[in-house]
Image (spheres, coloured by chain):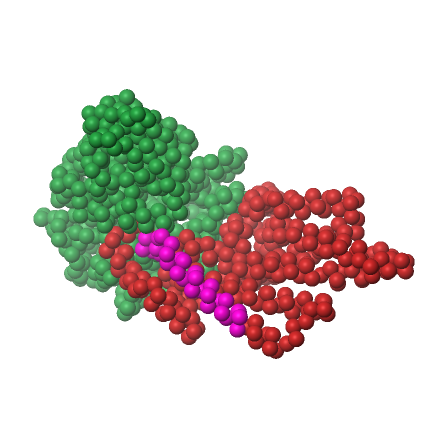
Chain colours: A red, B green
């Protein structure tokens, strides 16, 4: 087990190194430059001065080694367009993304698995059709549109929830206030992510339900519900964990669209702003964080597989 | 006399009395708060290279310029300077500073701060300060006494006071004086800026909002609105939804299509404002085909600007005649060539210039077709407007190859590298008739002279305007300049767009003319009960 963890850790670091190198060279090959300098407001002389300040007058490989050296010393550099240390920006945004991601993950898991189980239970009857209808809807509606619709209905018309932000301006910390702000973005995100979980849960359950040991259980006269929840669910979990792992990586690296629509100051918005403004150190910082999340979640998913299915072992 | 503004204490007393009376009659909420939106994290330092459109209005509440714009006609009015005088040779300006002004940390504001802001920041080429390039004629600022400064110039600069009012807040020397780079201090720019303005920062939550509270020791008296919040809302649709839901009190609408629905809300009113903004097509003068003025004129005759304004701007705009927009009432001249839509005339002019229809209908000269590379960026309505221009040109046998690019890459290609033959863009300039940075030959290729238009005659006209020592000679010089550019078309002038602002009715005391001016007089705002 320890050997497995160590191997995965080393592999993970290698992946991060490769990802950072590829990102660094790609983003520098892309046309454009930091928006503080590349804008209609700046003349050639001003641009030159700023490129010098930013160290962008050095060759790309030298800059990569400089950056890598900084990272090894724990310094991710300074944002070119914001003037703040990248680490402080990441820390702030990561915490915000984490709140949204965890809430959405819980909602998605409960909703997705609940509906998936119900659909399997009532296979080919009206609840199944209704659920698969809702799932299809959630899958095909674009998130930004649903977000705006939710804002118009729940914030503008009904005035039930705030339309944007993470907490009320200038207010003391209050859990209720935070939850109220979470409802719309987390709800919309969960609605668009949940269909995958519903489908995978349903089909995995149905597959397991047609296996021999389930037939045996039924033959013993065990009630259908007990068969489903006790005998099949655990065995159907592996593909569900896989899809939840994928959703987790998407959520924890920040949902660009939903964060923009709901003014949620998370990693996704930071990434898109940095990319639009060619803020190289921030792009690399976000890439590193997102890469680390993927590596870590994959590791956890592998561990979970072993926990739910004894046939899988990492010894 | 616009160049000599004499401070008249009795006049100010009368005005203060009148305004005070008006505000009292207008019963306002002393705890009122206003919430606005900005599209990205601001930088709270007006000269920082990264402080542009997302920061400008916020910085106007925290920092103050020497000169403000007059609320009615944009002429220079007192700000931190109470009066000024230009030397007879036009080579120096003396400004008397307002006494009793305090920085928000309690230290007094003096001439040293003004000298620091201009000498060490605007003129320090290493910093790349936003707007620093506009002060090319300025040599240095001298401190005469704690409340008098002298701006010493290399060449006369009749529009200096206009420039001094354009997003150029004075910075505190006692805070930034020792910094290696006074424009990159994160604590100042993102948390604790120190200014003389009517508001100071209470809280800056990155990515979420900036909350300002009134500065009770403001020299103009305590502001009437207790706090002003700028929420960071990048999505224009969300901004509009928040305005309709009452979470925002004012929104600037970049896409007129979003206006649908506001008329159903009786609390919201639409204000059509003006700034010195004009859209244009630039024809790269490094391309010999566009050196012929007949070709430039023809390409403008071919465009139905009225139709584009109606279709793309939903009618919120006016056909442009030159770089000076109508809101500069003193200087704007309408009686210049205006190139009403006339495709026949366009074809005639091109024929005179030697362009004749080829076999496939595309005009050719010396066997080469009139094909034009026309990159455009994804921003606002640049893409649809460019596509319409392409269609109008196609109708007279000119083939424009439009390439739609991501914004930053477009700026790099078009502006930094000047790799384009034609492009549609806009300028938003200080409301002064002095347009030298965008037109003079020395700004071609590396400055803001986008079409790289080089003309000794235009340089001379611009210089005459800068040299003018009386309002009369200034108006005259710029009349000639407007005629020249309307005839020669360094840029093909398209339209002056209206700036559409939707405001909640509860806001009182806010200037309608435009936002840049409205925010210079924020201490007069109030929230109606």
Q: Is residue B463 left or right of residue A131?
A: left
Measuring from the top left, give residue B71's x and y in whole percent: 31, 42
Which is nearer the eye, B306 or B368? B368
Quarter of the image where one finds residue B377: top left
Quadrant holding the N terminus of chain A: bottom right
Residue range highlighted in magenta: A10-38
* Residue extending furthest toward the left: B89
* Residue extending furthest toward the bottom: A2
Q: Is residue B45 left or right of residue B457?
A: right
* Residue extending furthest toward the top: B344
Q: Residue at x 84, y 55 (%)?
A: A224
Measuring from the top left, give residue A35's x and y in whole percent: 35, 54
**Magenta stretch mostly in which secondary structure?**
helix
Which is nearer the eye, A236 or B422? A236
Measuring from the top left, give residue B258's x and y in whole percent: 48, 38
Residue B453 drawn above or below residue A28: above
Which is nearer the eye, A43 or B255? A43
Q: Residue at x 20, y 32 (%)?
A: B293
Measuring from the top left, give residue A129's x and y in whole percent: 74, 44
Q: Is residue A29 left or right of residue B109?
A: right
Q: Residue at x 58, y 43 (%)?
A: A149
Instruction: Say if residue B42 shows up in the picture.
Output: no
Instruction: Say if residue A234 shows up in the picture.
Output: yes
Whether residue B116 appears in magenta in the rendering, the answer is no
Q: Residue at x 38, y 68 (%)?
A: A67
Question: How many numbered discs?
Answer: 0
Whether residue A26 appears in magenta in the rendering, the answer is yes
């Amino acid at each position: 087990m320890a050997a497995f963890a160590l191997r995965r850790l080393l592999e993970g670091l290698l992946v991060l190194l490769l990802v950072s190198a590829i990102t660094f060279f790609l983003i520098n090959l892309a046309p454009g430059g930091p928006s503080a300098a590349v804008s209609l407001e700046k003349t050639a002389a001003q641009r030159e001065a700023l490129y010098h300040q930013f160290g962008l007058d050095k060759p790309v490989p030298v800059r990569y080694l400089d950056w890598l050296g900084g990272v090894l010393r724990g310094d991710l550099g300074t944002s070119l367009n914001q003037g703040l240390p990248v680490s402080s920006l990441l820390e702030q945004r990561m915490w915000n993304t984490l709140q949204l991601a965890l809430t959405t993950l819980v909602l998605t898991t409960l909703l997705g698995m609940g509906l998936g189980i119900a659909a399997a239970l009532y296979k080919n009857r009206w609840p199944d059709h209704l659920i698969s209808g809702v799932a299809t809807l959630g899958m095909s509606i674009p998130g930004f549109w649903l977000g705006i619709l939710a804002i118009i209905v729940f914030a503008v018309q009904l005035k039930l929830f705030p339309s944007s932000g993470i907490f009320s301006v200038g207010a003391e910390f209050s859990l209720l206030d935070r939850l109220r702000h979470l409802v719309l973005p987390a709800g919309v995100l969960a609605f668009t992510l949940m269909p995958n979980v519903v489908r995978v849960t349903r089909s995995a359950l149905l597959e397991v339900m047609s296996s021999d040991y389930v037939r045996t259980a039924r033959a013993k006269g065990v009630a259908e519900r007990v068969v489903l929840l006790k005998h099949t669910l655990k065995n159907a979990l592996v593909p569900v964990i896989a899809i939840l792992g994928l959703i987790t990586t998407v959520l924890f690296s920040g949902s660009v669209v939903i964060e923009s629509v709901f003014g949620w100051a998370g990693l996704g918005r930071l990434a898109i702003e940095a990319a639009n403004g060619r803020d190289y150190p921030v792009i690399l910082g976000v890439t590193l964080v997102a890469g680390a999340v993927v590596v870590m979640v994959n590791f956890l998913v592998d561990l979970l597989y072993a926990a739910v299915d004894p046939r899988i072992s990492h010894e | 006399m616009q160049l000599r503004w004499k401070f008249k204490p009795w006049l100010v007393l009368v005005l203060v009395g009148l305004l005070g009376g008006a505000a009292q009659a207008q019963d306002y909420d002393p705890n009122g708060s206003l919430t606005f939106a900005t599209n990205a994290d601001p930088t709270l330092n007006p000269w920082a290279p990264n402080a542009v459109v997302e920061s400008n209005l916020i910085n106007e509440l925290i920092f103050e310029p020497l000169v403000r714009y007059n609320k009615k006609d944009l002429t220079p009015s007192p700000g931190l300077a109470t009066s000024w005088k230009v030397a007879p040779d036009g080579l120096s300006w003396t400004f008397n500073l307002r006494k009793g002004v305090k920085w928000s940390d309690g230290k007094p504001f003096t001439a040293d701060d003004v000298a620091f802001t201009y000498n060490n920041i605007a003129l320090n080429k290493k910093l790349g300060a936003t707007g620093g390039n506009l002060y090319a004629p300025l040599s240095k600022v001298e401190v005469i006494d704690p409340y008098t400064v002298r701006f010493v110039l290399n060449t006369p600069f009749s529009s200096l006071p206009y420039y001094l009012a354009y997003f150029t807040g004075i910075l505190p020397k006692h805070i930034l004086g020792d910094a290696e780079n006074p424009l990159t201090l994160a604590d100042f720019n993102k948390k604790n800026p120190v200014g003389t303005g009517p508001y100071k920062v209470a809280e800056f939550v990155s990515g979420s909002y900036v909350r300002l509270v009134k500065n009770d020791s403001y020299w103009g008296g305590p502001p009437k609105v207790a706090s002003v919040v700028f929420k960071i809302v990048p999505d224009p649709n969300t901004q509009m939804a928040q305005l309709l839901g009452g979470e925002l009190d004012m929104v600037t609408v970049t896409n007129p299509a979003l206006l649908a629905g506001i008329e159903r809300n009786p609390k919201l009113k639409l204000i059509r404002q003006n700034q010195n903004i004009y859209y244009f097509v630039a024809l790269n003068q490094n391309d010999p085909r566009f050196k012929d003025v007949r070709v430039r004129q023809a390409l403008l005759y071919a465009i139905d600007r009225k139709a584009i304004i109606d279709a793309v701007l939903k009618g919120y705009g006016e056909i442009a005649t030159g770089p000076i927009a109508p809101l500069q009432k003193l200087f704007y001249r309408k009686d210049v060539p205006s190139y009403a839509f006339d495709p026949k005339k366009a074809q005639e002019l091109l024929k005179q210039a030697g362009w004749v229809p080829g076999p496939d209908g595309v005009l050719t000269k010396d066997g080469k077709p009139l094909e034009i590379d026309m990159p455009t960026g994804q921003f606002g309505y640049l893409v649809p407007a460019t596509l319409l221009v392409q269609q109008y040109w196609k109708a007279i046998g000119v083939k424009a190859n439009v390439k739609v690019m991501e914004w930053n890459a477009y700026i790099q290609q078009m502006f930094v590298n000047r790799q384009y033959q034609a492009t549609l863009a806009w300028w938003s300039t200080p409301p002064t008739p002095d347009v030298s940075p965008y037109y003079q030959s020395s700004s071609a290729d590396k400055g803001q002279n986008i079409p790289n238009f080089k003309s000794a005659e235009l340089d001379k006209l611009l210089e005459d305007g800068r040299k003018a020592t009386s309002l009369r000679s200034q108006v005259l010089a710029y009349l000639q300049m407007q005629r020249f550019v309307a005839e020669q078309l360094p840029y093909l002038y398209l339209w002056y767009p209206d700036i559409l602002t939707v405001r909640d009715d509860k806001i009182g005391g806010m200037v309608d003319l435009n936002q840049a001016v409205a925010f210079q007089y924020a201490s007069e705002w109030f929230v109606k009960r």
